[in-house]
Image: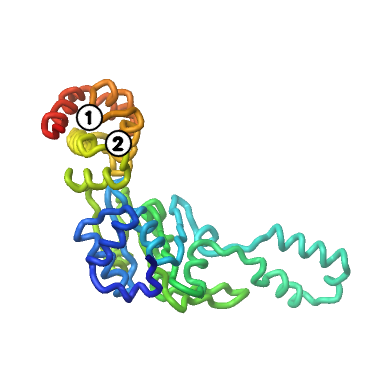
Amino acid sequence: MSVTDPRAVESAEEVAGALAAGAYLPDEGLATAVYLALRLRRPLLLEGEPGVGKTEVANVLAAWIGGGLIRLQCYEGIDSAQAVYEWDYARQLLYLRAAEATGRARSMDAAELSDELYDERFLVRRPLLRAIEPVAGPPPVLLVDEVDRADDEFEAFLLEILSDYSVTVPEVGTFAAAEPPVVVVTSNRTRDVHDALKRRCLYHWIDHPDQRRETDIIRLRVPEAGETLARQVACAAASIREIGLYKPPGVAETIDWARALALLGAETLAPDQVTATLGALLKYREDHQRVADNDLASIVDQARTANRP
Protein backbone atom coordinates (compact mmCIF):
# COMPACT_ATOMS: atom_id res chain seq x y z
CA MET A 1 0.00 0.00 0.00
CA SER A 2 1.35 3.44 -0.88
CA VAL A 3 0.35 6.88 0.34
CA THR A 4 0.26 9.65 -2.28
CA ASP A 5 0.24 12.39 0.37
CA PRO A 6 2.25 11.78 3.57
CA ARG A 7 0.09 14.38 5.32
CA ALA A 8 -2.87 12.01 4.92
CA VAL A 9 -1.45 9.63 7.53
CA GLU A 10 -3.88 9.69 10.43
CA SER A 11 -2.03 8.16 13.38
CA ALA A 12 1.18 6.71 14.74
CA GLU A 13 -0.58 3.36 14.77
CA GLU A 14 -1.06 3.61 11.01
CA VAL A 15 2.65 4.30 10.61
CA ALA A 16 3.53 1.35 12.84
CA GLY A 17 1.30 -0.92 10.79
CA ALA A 18 2.77 0.28 7.51
CA LEU A 19 6.34 -0.19 8.72
CA ALA A 20 5.49 -3.65 10.04
CA ALA A 21 4.04 -4.52 6.64
CA GLY A 22 7.46 -3.63 5.25
CA ALA A 23 9.14 -6.04 7.70
CA TYR A 24 10.20 -3.29 10.13
CA LEU A 25 8.92 -3.45 13.71
CA PRO A 26 9.12 0.03 15.29
CA ASP A 27 8.51 0.81 18.93
CA GLU A 28 5.89 3.38 19.88
CA GLY A 29 8.41 6.21 20.11
CA LEU A 30 9.77 5.69 16.60
CA ALA A 31 6.32 5.27 15.06
CA THR A 32 5.23 8.52 16.72
CA ALA A 33 8.35 10.37 15.53
CA VAL A 34 7.80 9.23 11.93
CA TYR A 35 4.11 10.20 12.10
CA LEU A 36 4.91 13.69 13.35
CA ALA A 37 7.65 14.16 10.75
CA LEU A 38 5.22 13.24 7.98
CA ARG A 39 2.40 15.44 9.23
CA LEU A 40 4.58 18.44 10.15
CA ARG A 41 6.77 18.12 7.03
CA ARG A 42 9.89 18.20 9.13
CA PRO A 43 13.11 16.28 8.57
CA LEU A 44 13.58 13.39 10.99
CA LEU A 45 17.01 13.01 12.59
CA LEU A 46 17.63 9.45 13.74
CA GLU A 47 20.61 8.77 15.97
CA GLY A 48 21.80 5.49 17.41
CA GLU A 49 24.50 2.86 17.36
CA PRO A 50 25.36 1.31 13.98
CA GLY A 51 23.07 -1.54 13.03
CA VAL A 52 19.96 -0.56 14.99
CA GLY A 53 17.87 0.08 11.86
CA LYS A 54 18.15 3.81 11.15
CA THR A 55 18.73 3.48 7.41
CA GLU A 56 16.08 0.80 7.08
CA VAL A 57 13.44 3.26 8.31
CA ALA A 58 14.01 5.34 5.16
CA ASN A 59 13.97 2.27 2.91
CA VAL A 60 10.64 1.06 4.27
CA LEU A 61 9.14 4.56 4.21
CA ALA A 62 10.09 4.96 0.55
CA ALA A 63 8.42 1.65 -0.34
CA TRP A 64 5.29 2.63 1.59
CA ILE A 65 4.95 6.19 0.30
CA GLY A 66 5.78 5.11 -3.22
CA GLY A 67 7.97 8.05 -4.23
CA GLY A 68 11.27 6.18 -4.32
CA LEU A 69 14.41 6.51 -2.22
CA ILE A 70 17.15 9.06 -2.93
CA ARG A 71 20.22 8.38 -0.81
CA LEU A 72 23.02 10.79 -0.04
CA GLN A 73 25.87 8.93 1.68
CA CYS A 74 27.94 11.40 3.67
CA TYR A 75 31.69 11.12 4.13
CA GLU A 76 34.59 13.31 5.14
CA GLY A 77 35.20 15.98 2.50
CA ILE A 78 31.82 15.75 0.75
CA ASP A 79 30.85 19.01 -0.95
CA SER A 80 28.15 20.48 -3.16
CA ALA A 81 29.54 18.87 -6.32
CA GLN A 82 28.89 15.41 -4.88
CA ALA A 83 25.70 16.35 -3.05
CA VAL A 84 23.84 18.84 -5.29
CA TYR A 85 25.10 19.15 -8.85
CA GLU A 86 28.09 19.41 -11.13
CA TRP A 87 28.66 19.93 -14.83
CA ASP A 88 29.46 17.07 -17.17
CA TYR A 89 32.75 18.52 -18.40
CA ALA A 90 33.50 15.54 -20.65
CA ARG A 91 30.24 15.99 -22.56
CA GLN A 92 30.73 19.75 -22.70
CA LEU A 93 34.19 19.25 -24.21
CA LEU A 94 32.84 16.81 -26.80
CA TYR A 95 30.08 19.26 -27.68
CA LEU A 96 32.57 22.10 -28.04
CA ARG A 97 34.82 20.04 -30.30
CA ALA A 98 31.84 19.02 -32.43
CA ALA A 99 30.78 22.67 -32.72
CA GLU A 100 34.29 23.62 -33.79
CA ALA A 101 34.49 20.76 -36.30
CA THR A 102 31.20 21.72 -37.96
CA GLY A 103 31.95 25.42 -37.92
CA ARG A 104 29.06 26.29 -35.58
CA ALA A 105 31.45 27.68 -32.97
CA ARG A 106 32.68 30.36 -35.41
CA SER A 107 29.13 31.60 -36.00
CA MET A 108 28.45 32.17 -32.27
CA ASP A 109 29.84 34.80 -29.95
CA ALA A 110 31.29 33.85 -26.56
CA ALA A 111 28.02 34.42 -24.68
CA GLU A 112 26.01 32.24 -27.03
CA LEU A 113 28.58 29.44 -26.84
CA SER A 114 28.66 29.66 -23.05
CA ASP A 115 24.86 29.45 -22.92
CA GLU A 116 24.93 26.28 -24.96
CA LEU A 117 27.74 24.70 -22.94
CA TYR A 118 25.95 25.42 -19.67
CA ASP A 119 22.60 24.18 -20.86
CA GLU A 120 20.56 22.02 -18.49
CA ARG A 121 21.29 18.92 -20.59
CA PHE A 122 24.90 19.01 -19.33
CA LEU A 123 23.83 19.32 -15.69
CA VAL A 124 24.56 16.26 -13.55
CA ARG A 125 21.94 16.08 -10.83
CA ARG A 126 23.19 14.74 -7.51
CA PRO A 127 20.91 13.48 -4.70
CA LEU A 128 19.91 16.83 -3.14
CA LEU A 129 18.93 18.36 -6.48
CA ARG A 130 17.06 15.22 -7.58
CA ALA A 131 15.16 15.23 -4.28
CA ILE A 132 13.74 18.73 -4.78
CA GLU A 133 12.91 18.56 -8.47
CA PRO A 134 9.15 18.58 -9.13
CA VAL A 135 7.80 15.08 -9.67
CA ALA A 136 4.43 13.61 -10.55
CA GLY A 137 2.99 11.48 -7.79
CA PRO A 138 4.23 10.95 -4.22
CA PRO A 139 7.33 12.81 -3.03
CA PRO A 140 10.58 10.87 -2.72
CA VAL A 141 12.23 9.95 0.56
CA LEU A 142 15.60 11.70 0.86
CA LEU A 143 17.99 9.76 3.08
CA VAL A 144 20.99 11.77 4.30
CA ASP A 145 22.97 8.88 5.72
CA GLU A 146 25.64 9.24 8.40
CA VAL A 147 25.66 13.04 8.44
CA ASP A 148 28.13 12.91 11.34
CA ARG A 149 30.83 11.85 8.87
CA ALA A 150 30.58 15.16 6.99
CA ASP A 151 32.27 18.36 8.11
CA ASP A 152 30.80 21.53 9.61
CA GLU A 153 30.65 23.38 6.30
CA PHE A 154 28.58 20.69 4.67
CA GLU A 155 26.20 20.62 7.63
CA ALA A 156 25.64 24.35 7.22
CA PHE A 157 25.02 23.88 3.51
CA LEU A 158 22.58 21.03 4.19
CA LEU A 159 20.72 23.19 6.68
CA GLU A 160 20.27 25.87 4.01
CA ILE A 161 18.83 23.32 1.57
CA LEU A 162 16.43 21.91 4.15
CA SER A 163 15.19 25.39 5.08
CA ASP A 164 13.41 26.14 1.79
CA TYR A 165 14.02 23.08 -0.40
CA SER A 166 15.46 25.08 -3.26
CA VAL A 167 18.77 25.20 -5.09
CA THR A 168 20.04 27.92 -7.41
CA VAL A 169 22.28 26.92 -10.29
CA PRO A 170 23.68 30.26 -11.52
CA GLU A 171 23.85 29.22 -15.17
CA VAL A 172 20.35 27.70 -15.26
CA GLY A 173 18.11 29.11 -12.54
CA THR A 174 16.44 28.05 -9.33
CA PHE A 175 15.06 24.57 -8.70
CA ALA A 176 12.39 24.46 -5.98
CA ALA A 177 10.33 21.58 -4.67
CA ALA A 178 6.61 21.86 -5.31
CA GLU A 179 6.17 19.12 -2.70
CA PRO A 180 9.04 18.79 -0.19
CA PRO A 181 10.60 15.34 0.02
CA VAL A 182 10.29 13.23 3.14
CA VAL A 183 13.71 13.67 4.74
CA VAL A 184 15.42 11.17 7.03
CA VAL A 185 18.83 12.14 8.41
CA THR A 186 20.87 9.50 10.24
CA SER A 187 23.85 9.80 12.56
CA ASN A 188 25.97 7.21 14.36
CA ARG A 189 27.07 10.00 16.70
CA THR A 190 30.76 9.72 15.94
CA ARG A 191 30.57 13.46 16.61
CA ASP A 192 27.78 15.77 17.72
CA VAL A 193 25.53 17.15 15.00
CA HIS A 194 25.26 20.92 15.29
CA ASP A 195 22.35 22.40 17.22
CA ALA A 196 21.16 24.40 14.19
CA LEU A 197 20.54 21.22 12.21
CA LYS A 198 18.92 19.52 15.19
CA ARG A 199 16.55 22.45 15.62
CA ARG A 200 15.45 22.07 12.01
CA CYS A 201 14.64 18.39 12.54
CA LEU A 202 12.50 16.24 14.75
CA TYR A 203 14.77 13.97 16.77
CA HIS A 204 14.62 10.34 17.83
CA TRP A 205 17.22 8.06 19.36
CA ILE A 206 16.96 4.43 18.23
CA ASP A 207 18.26 2.05 20.85
CA HIS A 208 18.86 -1.66 20.64
CA PRO A 209 15.48 -3.39 21.00
CA ASP A 210 14.60 -5.34 24.10
CA GLN A 211 14.81 -9.11 23.88
CA ARG A 212 11.12 -9.66 23.15
CA ARG A 213 11.02 -7.19 20.27
CA GLU A 214 14.31 -8.44 18.87
CA THR A 215 12.86 -11.96 18.89
CA ASP A 216 9.87 -10.68 16.93
CA ILE A 217 12.20 -8.93 14.48
CA ILE A 218 14.19 -12.12 13.93
CA ARG A 219 11.01 -14.12 13.39
CA LEU A 220 9.79 -11.54 10.87
CA ARG A 221 13.06 -11.20 8.94
CA VAL A 222 14.23 -14.82 9.25
CA PRO A 223 11.06 -16.92 9.04
CA GLU A 224 13.14 -20.07 8.60
CA ALA A 225 14.40 -19.65 12.18
CA GLY A 226 12.12 -21.30 14.71
CA GLU A 227 10.66 -19.58 17.76
CA THR A 228 13.12 -21.20 20.16
CA LEU A 229 16.18 -20.35 18.09
CA ALA A 230 14.99 -16.75 17.64
CA ARG A 231 14.53 -16.30 21.40
CA GLN A 232 17.90 -17.82 22.21
CA VAL A 233 19.71 -15.74 19.58
CA ALA A 234 18.10 -12.54 20.88
CA CYS A 235 18.99 -13.47 24.47
CA ALA A 236 22.61 -14.32 23.64
CA ALA A 237 23.03 -11.16 21.56
CA ALA A 238 21.72 -9.02 24.44
CA SER A 239 24.22 -10.64 26.82
CA ILE A 240 27.09 -10.16 24.37
CA ARG A 241 26.27 -6.44 24.02
CA GLU A 242 26.78 -6.00 27.76
CA ILE A 243 30.37 -7.23 27.68
CA GLY A 244 31.76 -3.89 26.49
CA LEU A 245 32.81 -4.65 22.95
CA TYR A 246 34.56 -2.37 20.48
CA LYS A 247 31.61 -2.78 18.11
CA PRO A 248 28.52 -4.24 19.80
CA PRO A 249 26.35 -6.17 17.34
CA GLY A 250 23.31 -4.38 15.97
CA VAL A 251 19.98 -5.81 14.91
CA ALA A 252 21.33 -6.30 11.39
CA GLU A 253 24.09 -8.55 12.72
CA THR A 254 21.66 -10.47 14.92
CA ILE A 255 19.48 -11.14 11.88
CA ASP A 256 22.53 -12.34 9.94
CA TRP A 257 23.52 -14.63 12.83
CA ALA A 258 20.05 -16.15 13.08
CA ARG A 259 19.98 -16.67 9.31
CA ALA A 260 23.39 -18.37 9.37
CA LEU A 261 22.35 -20.69 12.21
CA ALA A 262 19.07 -21.55 10.51
CA LEU A 263 20.96 -22.32 7.30
CA LEU A 264 23.05 -24.84 9.25
CA GLY A 265 19.85 -26.47 10.46
CA ALA A 266 20.06 -25.25 14.04
CA GLU A 267 16.91 -25.41 16.13
CA THR A 268 18.61 -24.25 19.32
CA LEU A 269 21.95 -22.70 20.14
CA ALA A 270 24.76 -25.24 20.17
CA PRO A 271 28.31 -24.26 21.23
CA ASP A 272 30.02 -25.62 18.11
CA GLN A 273 27.60 -23.88 15.72
CA VAL A 274 27.78 -20.65 17.72
CA THR A 275 31.58 -20.64 17.47
CA ALA A 276 31.47 -21.42 13.75
CA THR A 277 28.99 -18.63 12.96
CA LEU A 278 30.15 -15.92 15.37
CA GLY A 279 31.66 -14.00 12.46
CA ALA A 280 28.13 -13.13 11.36
CA LEU A 281 27.61 -11.36 14.70
CA LEU A 282 31.02 -9.87 15.54
CA LYS A 283 33.26 -8.17 12.98
CA TYR A 284 36.42 -7.43 14.97
CA ARG A 285 39.04 -9.92 16.19
CA GLU A 286 39.30 -8.11 19.52
CA ASP A 287 35.57 -8.58 20.10
CA HIS A 288 35.85 -12.30 19.36
CA GLN A 289 38.62 -12.56 21.94
CA ARG A 290 36.70 -10.55 24.51
CA VAL A 291 33.64 -12.78 24.11
CA ALA A 292 35.84 -15.85 24.50
CA ASP A 293 37.41 -14.36 27.64
CA ASN A 294 33.91 -13.83 29.05
CA ASP A 295 33.04 -17.52 28.63
CA LEU A 296 31.00 -17.83 25.44
CA ALA A 297 29.88 -21.30 26.46
CA SER A 298 28.28 -19.86 29.60
CA ILE A 299 26.47 -17.19 27.58
CA VAL A 300 25.09 -19.87 25.26
CA ASP A 301 24.07 -22.05 28.19
CA GLN A 302 22.23 -19.18 29.89
CA ALA A 303 20.37 -18.36 26.67
CA ARG A 304 19.37 -22.02 26.25
CA THR A 305 18.29 -22.36 29.88
CA ALA A 306 16.21 -19.18 29.86
CA ASN A 307 14.56 -20.01 26.56
CA ARG A 308 13.93 -23.74 26.42
CA PRO A 309 11.67 -25.21 23.71
In the image, 80 versus 28, the foreground residue is 28
Residue occupying image coordinates x 31% and y 42%:
223
Which tag, 2 or 1, sits closer to the chain's start? 2
Residue occupying image coordinates x 31% and y 50%:
53
Indicate the position of residue 141 as horizontal and vertical percent values.
41, 64
Indicate the position of residue 108 as horizontal and vertical percent values.
81, 76
Indicate the position of residue 166 as horizontal and vertical percent values.
47, 74
Residue occupying image coordinates x 80% and y 77%:
109
Helix, strand or loop under label 2: helix
In the image, 268 versus 93, the foreground residue is 268
Tell me if 39 is positioned left or right of 130 in this view: left
Label 1, residues with CA under 10 Å away: few <14, some 14-19, many ≥20: many
Q: Quadrant location of residue 273?
A: top left
Kind of residue at badge 2? Ala
Residue pointed to by mark 1: 268
Say above or below: 232 vs 214.
above
Q: Nearer the viewer, mark 2 or mark 1?
A: 1
Indicate the position of residue 44 as horizontal and vertical percent values.
31, 64
In the image, 139 versus 217, the foreground residue is 217
Kind of residue at badge 1? Thr
Evaluate whether residue 283 shows in this view.
Answer: no
Label 2, residues with CA under 10 Å away: few <14, some 14-19, many ≥20: many
Helix, strand or loop under label 1: loop
Residue pointed to by mark 2: 258
Say above or below: 251 vs 119.
above
Tell me if 285 is positioned left or right of 115 in this view: left
Q: CA distance from mark 2 to mark 1?
A: 10 Å
